[in-house]
Structures are given as C-alpha cells and as structure tokens.
Image (tube, rainbow, N blue to C red):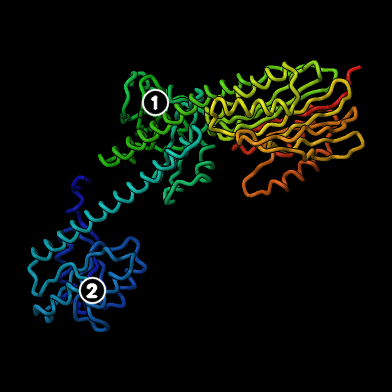
C-alpha cells in the first residue's frame, strides 16, 4: 500500500467551463483564493480543445450543464471516452438543471459530483478537494501497479538470464524503468569477474527491458567493483538487503557522469553468506518514498537470487565438465599409419553436458579410431560415455574387429540396462594393407578425401546401439597414402531449421577446399561451421600415411 501523501490537499489546475462570465468569475475567485490555478472555457468545444492540447492537463473540470454548443453531459461523456482524459474528475454545476432526474443523468453519464447553484464556497472547495484526493490516490495506485508490473517483468528477465552480464543488464534496465531514472548494476560473476551494466532513463518508457537496449547501455558502465563500495565492509557476511546512501566520489571508477548530483541510493543484496553482494545504484533523488525504497531493494534481492542460482548452476556445470573431460584421452598417440588431430568443444557453459567422445588407440592390427555420441545431455550421458569408452579400449586391446566391438558394446548396454542409446563409428586403419575397416552404428558417415581430390562419404552403416539390433559387416575402403578422413559428431553441422542432408553436402564442399594438414583441416571445418553452443562437438581428422613398412 502507498502511504497517504500531503499533496492530496495541495492546489491544482482546474478547468472551469461556463458560458456565463459572471459564473466563471465567481468560481474563479473562490478557487483562486484557495490557491488553485483556473483555466476558463466559455463552451464545450473550447473546453475539449484545451484538454486535447493542454500539457499538463487540469486535475479537475467544473462543467456547467447548460452550454450553448452542447450539454455539459455531452462534454463529460467525451472527456471520459478519451483515454488521455478518462481519469479527469468532472463536477457538474447548474442553476437550472437541479432536479433529481438531472443529477441522476449527470452522474450516470460519467460525472464524479453534481452541485446546484447557488453553491456555498466551502461546499465547492470541499467537493473539489474530495475529487482531487480521490483522483490523486487513484493515480498513485495506478502508478504503483504499473511499477510492480515492470518489477515483475524485470524479475522474470533476471531469472531467465544465462550469464552474469545478462543478470546485470536486466537489473539495470529494470531499475531504470521501475524508478524512471538512470540505474547502474554491479556484481561479481560466478568466475569472480566484476560485471556492470547501465540502464538509462531514456529507456524508462519501454514496457519491458529489452536485450538490445540492455546490451547497448551495458557497455557504458566501465569497469568497477562492488567490493570497492565504501560501505562494503559494513555489510559483513550477512544475507538480505540494505539501502545505503553513498557518495559516488568515494567509489573508485564508478561512472559518476551517469548519476547527476553525486549521491547514490544503493540497494545492496546478498543471497548467501560470504558471497559478494550485488548493488543497484540510482540517483538519491529517485528514491524518496518508502515505495521507492522497497522497489529498489526488492529488485536488488531478485538480482542476488538470480545470480546465486546462476552461480550454483555454473559450479555444478564446471564440475560435470571436468568429469566429462576426464573421460577423454589426454593425448593422441603417434602412429606410422596416420597423422591425427582432434578438437573437442563442449556445448556452451549454460547447456547440459553431453556424451560426445573420441578415441585413438594403436593395436597390433593397426590404428583404431572412434567417434561416438551418447544420446541426450545429462550427467547420465557423460557417465555412460565414460563406460563405453573404457569398454571400447578393452575390446580393442583384445584385438576384436570393429564389427565385433560394436556387438560387445551392444551386449554391455543390455547387461547394464542402460536407458540411453548411442551412435558410434569405429575405423581400423589396417597396419598391413592400409585399408580402412569401417563399422558405423548409426553415426554420421565418415568423410574421405583421396589424394586425387575426390571427396565422398562412407555411407555403409548399421542401427544405433542400444536397440538390440544386429550390425552389418564392416566396410573395407581403400585409402591411398595422403587420404584425409574426417569423423565428427552432429554438433559440428546440425542446426535448427537446417536440413541435415544440406549440411552434409556443404561439409563435403568445404572439405574439398582444405589443405592436407590435419590441424588445418580441423580449424577450417570449425571456421566453416562455427559451433552454436547447443551441442558438443567431437571432431577428428586423420591423414593416412600408408601401411607400416
């Protein structure tokens, strides 16, 4: 609830509409003596013109019922029908239309009060004061409701922010809109980096803080640290919110040119003990009432909670990503059969971890290469990926063929009752013949470029693993020395609203333009297909050097 304001009884601008100059004089005199400012109109047309062009609008209209061009009832209806003036209190006055029927008609057609002449000055002033009190209270309530709506929208954006920078931007833009002024938000990101953003008063009329506006204003904040706030040490380790009045000059590197007056009202909030607080700072003149204070501190608290949720998720994700990376090879083996290069790019730090993996292992029969992808993005997918990779290495060391390895992994999935499926492509570079033995269980086809420039996919494949379906025999493919083979997961080329066939065709086209160096092949493919952050990418490039001599 907003508190009663002493301005409810303060003087106002009042429109007096009467065709009788004497009546206008009497009304003007009474109202002026009470401190009100009077604007006069001699008929309904003139009154409506004043209201349409007037800035600012009068706060009350006194309208005579008997006007020469239209009735006061018509004037009232037109005032109430216009959204700009609909909230303007209308008080009818009349010396002739004084029956109960007249008064009823006037009130039914929109008037807020009805006075009959002669009117005692005290009654006139009391009626005007009552109308003003109601209208001003209504405006305050609507203003507060509008601010609460903006607060809710800003809070919604805060909880959907994916980065600390987005949290800061949403908070700054939200505070600028809610309080109608320039606002600065500063916080410490989950990785310990100071992050700041500015929301400007120029955008205070926007209904919802937009990402474009936030980005444009966020760059103007500069670099400053909430931990250098002069009152930072006073906060201790406590959680909750506080409102401080801070001299901007005492805050190192604070963008003082953005906050006129030099004194800040700073909403400080911390959601967990020991965490660096978040701070929302606005000019002190923008925080006058208790409603202003509550709105600022509530938005600061929402910012702290959103940041804490992001921090918790980031910590969990970093831990899971470390676990996921521990399942992948530390280094690639050196082999006389092929030169190898690999790239592994996890999905963005805000996506679930996935089950993409690769393997390269020398065996007595040659060089075993594998790229696979466990379905889904979760810790379960990463854990299953680790199990599959260790099993694959064990089966390879036992010198099983690529097809036999797929069969054994299928049996393993059945034995452990794995709830997920996976795709897996295994290629054995034969140490004696240089042939490629390709066993593909539902994975993207390997792409082969031979020294003569021919580029083609090795299309032979079987069903993905986890369906308990038999696999076809491995394909044998000739790969002369100098051939380059590319194996990848779908994160490299799969995009929303793009046909996978078109992406594969483009992949083959790009492959035909790349040099033979496998490191440059990986770099070239990632340049042509920049990751979109929605899926992991495991990419392996292999340059066949020929069978062992």
The disc, 2 or 1, on the residue closer to the chain's N-terminal end is: 2
- Determine the residue positioned at 9% across, 80% down: 99
Which residue is identified by label 1? 277
Which residue is identified by label 2? 17
Q: Is residue 10 left or right of residue 57?
A: left
Residue 108: % across, % down: 18, 73
- Looking at the picture, does residue 51 appear above or below residue 301? below
Residue 415: % across, % down: 56, 25
Secondary structure, mark 2, is: strand
Residue 311, numbered circle = none
Can residue 523 be seen here? The reply is no
Residue 76: % across, % down: 24, 73
Residue count near mark 2 (Cα–Cα under 10 Å), binned few <14, some 14–19, many ≥20: many
Can residue 217 be seen here? The reply is yes
Task: Compare residues 114 and 83 and report the one nearer the observer.
Answer: 83
Q: Is residue 260 left or right of residue 396?
A: left
Q: Quadrant of residue 283?
A: top left
Task: Compare residues 298 and 245 and report the one nearer the observer.
Answer: 298
Is there a contact, CB below 8 Å, between mark 2 and mark 1? no
Q: Is residue 400 left or right of residue 101?
A: right
Q: Distance between the Cα atoms at labels 2 and 1?
A: 57 Å
Task: Compare residues 156 and 407 and report the one nearer the observer.
Answer: 407
- Determine the residue positioned at 70% across, 27% down: 343
Q: Quadrant of residue 199?
A: top left
Circle nearer the viewer, 2 or 1: 1
Q: How many marks?
A: 2
Residue 137: % across, % down: 21, 54
Secondary structure, mark 1, is: loop
Quadrant of image for the C terminus: top right
Task: Compare residues 151 and 140 and report the one nearer the observer.
Answer: 151
- Looking at the picture, does residue 193 appear above or below residue 116? above
Residue count near mark 1 (Cα–Cα under 10 Å), binned few <14, some 14–19, many ≥20: many
């Amino acid at each position: 609830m907003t508190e009663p304001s002493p301005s409810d009884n303060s003087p106002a601008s009042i429109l007096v509409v009467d065709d009788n100059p004497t009546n206008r004089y009497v009304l003007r005199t009474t109202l002026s003596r009470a401190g009100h400012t009077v604007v006069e109109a001699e008929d309904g047309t003139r009154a409506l013109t004043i209201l349409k062009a007037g800035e600012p609008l009068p706060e009350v209209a006194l309208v005579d019922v008997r006007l020469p061009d239209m009735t006061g009832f018509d004037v009232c209806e037109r005032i109430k029908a216009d959204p700009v003036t609909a909230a303007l209190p209308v008080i009818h006055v009349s010396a002739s239309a004084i029956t109960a029927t007249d008064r009823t008609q006037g009130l039914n057609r929109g008037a807020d009060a009805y006075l009959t002449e002669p009117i005692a000055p005290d009654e006139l002033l009391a009626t005007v004061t009552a109308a003003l009190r109601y209208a001003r209270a209504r405006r305050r309530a609507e203003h507060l409701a509008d601010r609460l709506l903006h607060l809710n929208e800003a809070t919604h954006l805060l909880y959907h922010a994916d980065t600390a920078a987005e949290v800061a931007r949403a908070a700054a833009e939200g505070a600028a809109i809610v309080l109608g002024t320039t606002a600065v938000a500063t916080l410490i990101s989950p990785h310990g980096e100071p992050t700041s953003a500015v929301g400007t008063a120029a955008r205070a009329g926007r209904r919802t803080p937009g990402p474009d506006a936030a980005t444009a204003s966020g760059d103007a904040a500069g670099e400053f640290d909430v931990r250098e706030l002069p009152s930072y040490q006073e906060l201790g380790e406590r959680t909750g919110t506080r409102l401080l009045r801070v001299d901007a000059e005492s805050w190192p590197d604070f963008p003082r040119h953005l906050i006129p007056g030099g004194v800040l009202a700073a909403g400080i909030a911390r959601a967990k003990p020991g965490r660096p607080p978040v701070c929302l700072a606005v000019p002190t003149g923008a925080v006058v009432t208790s409603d202003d204070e509550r709105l600022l501190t509530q938005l600061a608290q929402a910012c702290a909670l959103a940041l804490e949720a992001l921090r918790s998720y980031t910590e969990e994700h970093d831990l899971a990503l470390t676990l996921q990376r521990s399942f992948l090879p530390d280094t690639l083996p050196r082999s006389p059969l092929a030169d190898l290069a690999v790239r592994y790019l996890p999905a963005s730090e805000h996506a679930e971890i996935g089950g993409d993996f690769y393997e390269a292992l020398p065996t007595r029969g040659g060089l075993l290469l594998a790229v696979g992808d466990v379905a889904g993005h979760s810790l379960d997918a990463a854990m299953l990926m680790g199990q599959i990779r260790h099993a694959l290495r064990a089966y390879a060391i036992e010198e099983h063929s690529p097809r036999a390895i797929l069969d054994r992994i299928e049996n393993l999935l059945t034995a452990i009752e794995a709830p997920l499926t996976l795709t897996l492509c295994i290629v054995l570079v034969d140490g004696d013949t240089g042939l490629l033995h390709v066993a593909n269980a539902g994975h993207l086809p390997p792409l082969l470029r031979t020294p003569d420039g021919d580029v083609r996919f090795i299309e032979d494949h079987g069903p993905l693993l986890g369906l308990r379906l038999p696999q076809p025999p491995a394909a044998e493919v000739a790969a002369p020395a100098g051939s380059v083979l590319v194996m990848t997961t779908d994160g490299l080329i799969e995009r929303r609203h793009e046909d996978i066939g078109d992406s594969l065709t483009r992949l083959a086209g790009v492959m035909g333009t790349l040099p033979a160096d496998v490191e440059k092949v990986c770099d070239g493919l990632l340049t042509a297909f920049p990751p979109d952050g929605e899926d992991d990418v495991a990419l392996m490039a292999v340059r066949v050097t020929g069978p062992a001599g």
